[in-house]
């Protein structure tokens, strides 16, 4: 979490509690100087109606832009608005040159849309249209930020696989997982199931498996007063050494996190 200067430290903490859901008890705060962005980017101030979501890894999502920014691409502070009232806002770094990369979505949430219908710079797949700001071109493949368009739930393995002894294996026993989808009002018209194919968490993260959780209608997961976005968890059916299959959630935890999330939780251990 990057903050330009500390003129209102108490106000910052109070406003954060009201305007953001902090997924860490004590987020690491870096106080920056007046140089908010480098020369390749321009500064954009978020609107007062924007919803800012701070993720456990320090990145921030801005509702009006539908983009996730890494800690070095934004800062937050208390500002005076036109009526001289205090408001929480973020300064985000947007590409100021054509070749300046603008982050669109976490790598773990990018899906192949190369076989979509291409019209100009737009690609249509899954019933939605991806603009140029919603996909990447990598080695001839188009990777779309589907969670910018649809509500996402992330599955740890492929659609016809479950986790057996920590590995994804083909298994068509998906009854429990399908019941979970039905109970969370999963609708293919508004939701998308991101298949991680065995990549439980992004590099730099370890994982913890939990059995008590709730899938919210928007695809996020609620665990012990924490709300996790799709890049911070995956869900699947697990079995080990012939045990009965059960649906569990894998939480992605920063490897150097000094406050492990499994304290006091119904945890089955790290995978």
Image (cartoon, helix red, strand yellow):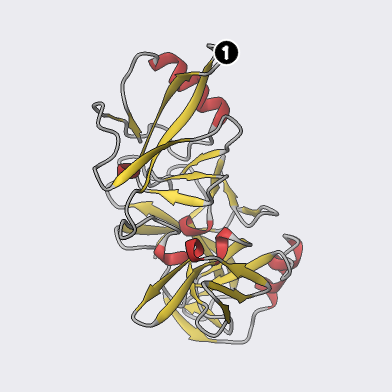
Residue at the disc numbered 1: 83
Which corner quadrant of the image does residue 136 belong to?
bottom left
> Label 1 neighbourhood size at 10 Å, few (<14), some (14-19), many (20+)?
few
- Vertical position of residue 119 compared to residue 81: above or below: below
Which corner quadrant of the image does residue 138 belong to?
bottom left
Residue 61 appears in view? yes
Q: Secondary structure at mark 1?
A: loop
Expressed as whole percent of the image width and height from the top left, the position of residue 160 reads 58, 85
The residue at 57%/45% (across/down) is 64
Question: Does residue 266 appear to the left or right of 182 in the view shown?
Answer: left
The residue at 32%/31% (across/down) is 29
Q: Nearer the viewer, residue 259 or 39?
A: 39
Q: Nearer the viewer, residue 230 or 8?
A: 8
The residue at 49%/25% (across/down) is 88
Residue 257 appears in view? no
Question: Does residue 51 appear to the left or right of 22 in the view shown?
Answer: right
Expressed as whole percent of the image width and height from the top left, the position of residue 55 reads 45, 45
Q: Nearer the viewer, residue 233 or 3?
A: 3
Question: Does residue 258 appear to the left or right of 178 in the view shown?
Answer: left
Residue lying furthest top: 84
Q: Quadrant of the N terminus?
A: top left
The residue at 49%/66% (across/down) is 132
């Amino acid at each position: 979490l990057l903050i330009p200067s500390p003129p209102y430290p108490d106000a910052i903490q109070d406003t954060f509690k009201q305007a953001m859901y902090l997924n860490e008890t004590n987020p690491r705060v870096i106080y920056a100087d007046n140089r908010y962005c480098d020369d390749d980017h321009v500064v954009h101030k978020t609107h007062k109606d924007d919803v800012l979501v701070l993720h456990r890894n320090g990145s921030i999502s801005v509702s009006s832009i539908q983009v996730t920014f890494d800690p070095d691409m934004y800062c937050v502070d208390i500002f005076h608005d036109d009526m001289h009232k205090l408001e929480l806002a973020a300064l985000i770094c947007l590409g100021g040159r054509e070749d300046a990369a603008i982050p669109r979505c976490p790598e773990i949430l990018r899906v192949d849309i190369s076989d979509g219908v291409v019209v100009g710079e737009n690609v249509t797949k899954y019933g939605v249209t991806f603009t140029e700001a919603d996909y990447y071109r990598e080695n001839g493949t188009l990777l779309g930020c589907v969670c910018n368009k649809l509500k996402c739930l992330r599955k740890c393995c492929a659609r016809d696989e479950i986790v057996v002894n920590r590995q994804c294996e083909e298994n068509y026993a998906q009854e429990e997982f399908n019941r979970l989808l039905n109970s969370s009002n999963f609708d293919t018209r508004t939701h998308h199931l991101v298949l991680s194919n065995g990549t439980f968490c992004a590099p730099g993260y370890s994982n913890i498996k939990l059995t008590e959780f709730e899938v919210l209608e928007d695809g996020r997961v609620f665990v012990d007063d924490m709300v996790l976005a799709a890049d911070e968890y995956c869900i699947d059916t697990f079995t080990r050494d012939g045990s009965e299959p059960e649906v569990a959630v894998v939480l992605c935890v920063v490897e150097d996190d000094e406050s492990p999330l499994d304290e006091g939780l119904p945890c089955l251990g790290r995978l």
